[in-house]
Amino acid sequence: MKKIFISSLFSVALFMGVAKAQIQKGNVLVGGNLTNINLGLDDPKIFSVDITPKAAWFIQDNIALGGYVNFGLQTTKNAPTTTSYGVGALGRYYTGKDVEVLNHGRFFAEATVGVGGVNVSRGGGNTNGLNLSVGPGFAYFITPNIGLETLLKYNGLVGFGSATTQNNLNLSFGFQIYLPGQRTANKVKSDIRN
């Protein structure tokens, strides 16, 4: 019984420690964003989706560096199919505690740089090359370590193909899971002992 109580106490303390430490140095974020989801409910001939999984490590409080992968598909009956892809590095900066919103939310800025492309079948415009994006976002923490977020980003693609540049503005929705790093876990253990 004593072991169960101590394990429960440790779990609660870890949960409470994470509540204050989602974006602290050493922690990890894993998740993704979804944009342009269209399942063709009104017109079953249309399907489009854009999925972007991400992972990053907090190199210091409020600053995370990591990577992303992107895959997008848009298909319509009797029209060209558009495929997009990308892989690269990302950086995030979360605003400080003094601009916390709704007690559980934080604004952040995200920038990415990588290799990407947009390819349209049947003679459409194709561009493959350097992919850059930047924009503001907002994360609302529904639990201490799960955040729902929205992100408005400018995406620019410069390279080679039938079109040398492509630009767009994306509004995406997604979630991130904030995992405590070893430093946070050790602090919680130390706090329990004291």
Image (cartoon, rainbow, N blue to C red):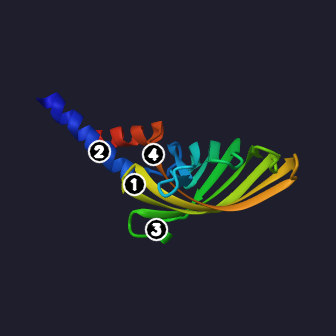
Name the residue: 50% across, 44% down. Answer: 31
Residue type indicated by callout 2: Ala
Mark 4 or mark 1, which has the lower sequence index? 1
Mark 4 → mark 1, Cα distance in angstroms: 14 Å
Q: Position of residue 117 (x, y in %)?
A: 76, 45
Query: Quarter of the image containing the C terminus?
Result: top left
Q: Amino acid at mark 1?
A: Lys
- In the rendered view, does 25 fall on the left or right side of 158? left
SS type, badge 2: helix
Residue at 44% in and 42% down: 180
Read off the residue under disc 1.
Answer: 20
**First in residue order: circle 4 vs circle 2:** 2
Q: Which residue is disc 4 drawn over?
A: 177
**Label disc, if present, on residue 100 of the rendered structure:** 3
Sequence-earlier tag: 3 or 1: 1
The secondary structure type at the circle numbered 4 is strand
| Residue furthest to the front | 78
Q: Which residue is mark 2?
A: 13
Of badges 4 and 1, the one in the foreground is 4
